[in-house]
Image: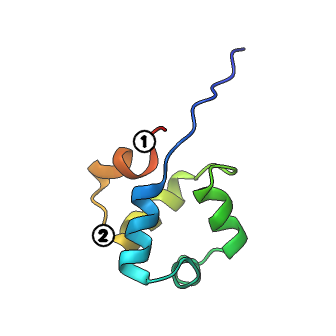
Amino acid sequence: MEENNQEFNFDKLVGRIIEKFKTRENFAAKVPMSIPTLINKLNGTVDFKRKEMLRFCELLDIPLEQIPKFFYETT
């Protein structure tokens, strides 16, 4: 099986987090999610689950049709 080495770019997602919640810590508390888990997801070390994406969209006022823009942009 061939490995996919594409890296996702979460800059837009991080920008929206800061815009709406001022800090990653504030956002993690609201999700709720531990700060290390959030950082690992935003660094691409750990994948997002679908339910997490939906929760993030709800909290960040991201329309569902914009999920690819925030969660699947590649570097």
Q: Earlier in the sequence, mark 1 or mark 2?
A: 2
Q: Position of residue 48 (x, y in %)?
A: 58, 52
Q: Position of residue 2 (x, y in %)?
A: 69, 15
Residue at which label 1 appears: 73
Q: Nearer the viewer, residue 72 or 50?
A: 72
- Quadrant the N terminus occupies: top right
Which amino acid is tagged 2? Asp
Q: Position of residue 27 (x, y in %)?
A: 51, 79
Badge 1: residue crowd in 10 Å (few <14, some 14–19, many ≥20): some
Question: What residue is at 51 percent from the left and 52 percent from the top?
Answer: 50
Of badges 1 and 2, nearer the viewer stands: 1
For residue 42, side relative to residue 57 (left or right): right
Badge 2: residue crowd in 10 Å (few <14, some 14–19, many ≥20): few
Residue furthest top in the image: 1
Which amino acid is tagged 1? Glu
Total of numbered circles in the picture? Answer: 2
Q: Are marks 1 and 2 in contact (CB under 8 Å)?
A: no
Question: Where is 74 relative to 14, above or below?
Answer: above
Measure the alpha-carbon separation of dots 1 and 2.
18 Å
Question: Where is 53 relative to 56, above or below?
Answer: above
For residue 46, side relative to residue 32 (left or right): right
SS for callout 2: loop
Classify residue 33 by image quadrant: bottom right
Question: What residue is at 65 percent from the left and 65 percent from the top?
Answer: 39
Q: Position of residue 67 (x, y in %)?
A: 36, 50
Q: Nearer the viewer, residue 63 or 6?
A: 6
For residue 73, side relative to residue 43 (left or right): left
Q: Which mark is residue 65?
A: none
Classify residue 11 by image quadrant: bottom left
Residue at which label 2 appears: 61
For residue 9, side relative to residue 16 (left or right): right
